[in-house]
Amino acid sequence: MSELRPMAISITWGAGGSTKDRSLELAGLTQSEYGVETILHLTCTNIQKGAIEDTLREAKQLGIQNILALRGGRIIFGLYKEEFIQNFKDPPRGTEHWIPTDPQFVHAQDLVEYIRASDEFSKQFCIGVAGYPEGHPDKEVNEEEELEYLKRKVDAGADFIITQLFYDHDDQEVKNYGIELSMRMIEKLRSDGEVHAFHFCTLNLEKSVRKVLEGLCWTGKDMDNLEQNKLISDNVERIPKIEGDLAITPHEASVTATHSFQTGPASDTGSIGKGEINHAATWDEFPNGRFGDFKSPAYGVPNLWDGGLGVKPSEARSRWGCPKTMGDLTECFLAYLHSKTESTPFSLTPLSPEAVLIMHYLENLTKRGWWTVGSQPAIDAAPSEDELIGWGPRNGYIFQKAFVEFFAESHDVQRLKERIQKHGCGMITFLASNLHGDYETNMSDEGTNAVTWGVFPGHEIAQSTIIERENFLSWKTEAFSIWLEWAHLYPPDSEEHRLLDKVRKTRWLVSVIHHDYKAPAALWEFLLKDETG
């Protein structure tokens, strides 16, 4: 980096001073040995008393002259020892929660003022502060408020400002940019006259390549152009016609399960089912969600740009209220089933139409305290055009195994495990795990459950929904982080926060699948059967 002659290099600082020694060592190395002006990031909350003075003194001894004064990120409960968590007043900024261990330092402004007021450090350090042109990540955007916070830090003695990273993060726009860039590169190479053929690597994600070919008019609509550029099929008559826009919206995701084997015109997407599970998978157009094949190159959570709840804190509290008891949480999940609220923290879209087929069962499970977060009914050969269930090409048939995911108490999980072992008759598979990494299942590590598949004329069987160990455990990690984010909507000493944190630490995420898709009530009757019956 020094060879690039930067104005300065930043050395970051771990939350609560967790990287203190390493950060100081690296900052001293870049400043003294490589002669690169170094900016040491320094947070002032979640640290022990006296640590700020010690750090500044060490930085001075290392010849560091620049400090980026930061307040510090939220404390993530559970990552630190419980005794480190202390009672404190609600933070003055939005809904962010942190621990001002040293009461002298509550804001970055306090750190700036401290350095400027110190005879030992005032003339030693050039001080920078953070600016948030798109709003602080832990609070709702208020431009005037952000500007006021920034002004206070500058008035306190800051010399320069570094803004947060900001960019447009629309997934489709990123893809569109790549497509346009690829087309420009190809056209430039062709215009030179030396390159006559191009090899495209799809990496099993073919839609962007198809878009490039469409833009270049190489999709089969212009056969002369195809012949000239060597993108030729051995049997020209079998080159498919690609009609319409190939991009899809997330709620049409299930139709993409059919694109890889489709040899005719794309089916009308107007009748595609928007089932809860098919809704989750986007297959290869975008990250394909938690119900795809974990080996897929697109496997991952649908939203890569938001690690929180996906809605603003004020909107989240409006939707889900202020739960103080387990009964309140049960009512929250029931409200979602009854369409009184359009989302839960675990399902940000309205309940799928196919849920009406199992609504009675979902209600009873939820009233029992088993809060459902994913489910589907058993389906035996429903037409692919079916408004509730259908997906894929016309004249096909859809099959589904019934399954459900829910949060339950530890003792319920153990009883369910025993019942499945004794009375499941080999027809029921379950997976269960908790925050602490405990894991129970009757599947092998390599076991895979295809719970949704379609059969279409002239095509191989298509599987659109898979449940297996890897994607379940990946979703488990995300699911328990959602409880944490939900808790952060409320002050740490509030009843709501304590309840949600308790649920996160004590409940299990459970997934249960019944393999007899010809018995639509089998799973639900097994789960709801009286223990003594």
Image (tube, rainbow, N blue to C red):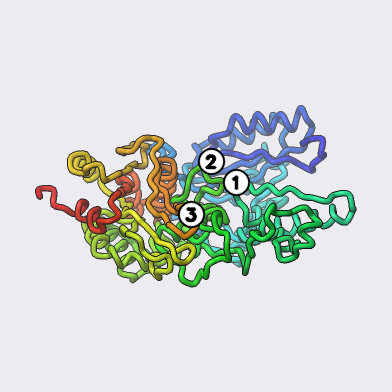
From the viewer's perspective, is 134 left or right of 443? right
Res 171 → quadrant: bottom right
Earlier in the chain: of badge 3 and badge 1, it is: 1
Q: CA distance from mark 3 to mark 1?
A: 28 Å
Neighbor class of circle 3 (other Cα within 10 Å; few <14, some 14-19, many 20+) is: some
How many numbered markers are drawn?
A: 3
Residue in the image at 39% along x and 48% along y: 450
In the picture of the structure, the residue carrying the numbered disc 3 is 308
In the picture of the structure, the residue carrying the numbered disc 1 is 111
For the question of whether residue 434 can be seen, the reply is yes
From the viewer's perspective, is 188 left or right of 454? right
Please determine whether, in this image, residue 265 is positioned above or below residue 504.
Answer: below
Which numbered dot is residue 102?
none
Q: Residue furthest left?
A: 532
Which numbered dot is residue 15?
2
Please determine whether, in this image, residue 148 is positioned above or below residue 5.
Answer: below
Q: CA distance from mark 2 to mark 3?
A: 18 Å
Residue 178 image offset from top left, x and y in percent: 70, 55
- For discs 3 and 1, the disc positioned in front in the rendered view: 3
Please, what is the three-letter code of the amino acid marked with disc 3? Gly
Residue in the image at 31% along x and 67% along y: 356
Residue 23 image offset from top left, x and y in percent: 63, 33
